[in-house]
Image (cartoon, rainbow, N blue to C red):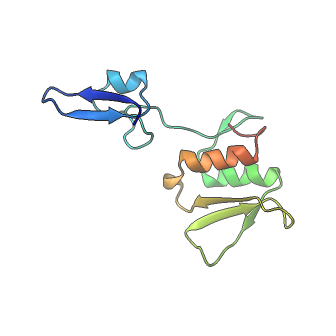
Amino acid sequence: MSGVWIFDKKGVARLIPNPTRESFEHKHPIYPGTSTAPGARPRVLVYLPTNQVINSYSELEHRLTELGWTRYHNFTQPHLLQFHKSENSAHLISLPRNFAHFRALHMYDIVVKNRSFFQ
């Protein structure tokens, strides 16, 4: 296990796997549950051509449609939103239906499959 061990006043230790300066400055995280390090800023998906932060699935779907992705309606998995590049491509992006559950893992998948358009 790598990271930094922090001891509180009672002598209880906790591990911070990916420490940031903010995680040491604040006793309670500013954004609880958004990242591995307490107090870390939440990650955002940015559409690079316009420097637009993606704040909803409607914005994301609009940008993906511009890039040639189409919505894939999979009735066997109604809890997912899926997009595919084309009928001849194996590329598929799967996202949770609720945008509140949209995490860095999903952002990474979008960035990898659209390298010059998202960060």
Q: Quadrant of residue 76?
A: bottom right
Across and down, in percent, residue 89 comes to 83, 62
At 85% from the left edge and 67% from the top edge, which residue is drawn? 87
Q: Residue furthest front?
A: 1
Side of 117 where 110 appears, left or right: left
| Residue in front for this viewpoint, 24 or 41 | 24
In the image, residue 41 above or below residue 87: above
| Residue in front for this viewpoint, 76 or 47 | 76
At 43% from the left edge and 39% from the top edge, which residue is drawn? 36
Across and down, in percent, residue 17 comes to 40, 34
Side of 47 where 77 appears, left or right: left
In the image, residue 34 above or below residue 69: above
| Residue in front for this viewpoint, 5 or 87 | 5
At 78% from the left edge and 62% from the top edge, which residue is drawn? 90
Across and down, in percent, residue 21 comes to 41, 21
Q: Residue furthest left?
A: 10
Total numbered badges shown on the rendered structure: 0
Across and down, in percent, residue 96 comes to 56, 60
At 54% from the left edge and 38% from the top edge, which residue is drawn? 43
Which quadrant does the N terminus fall into? top left
Side of 9 where 106 appears, left or right: right
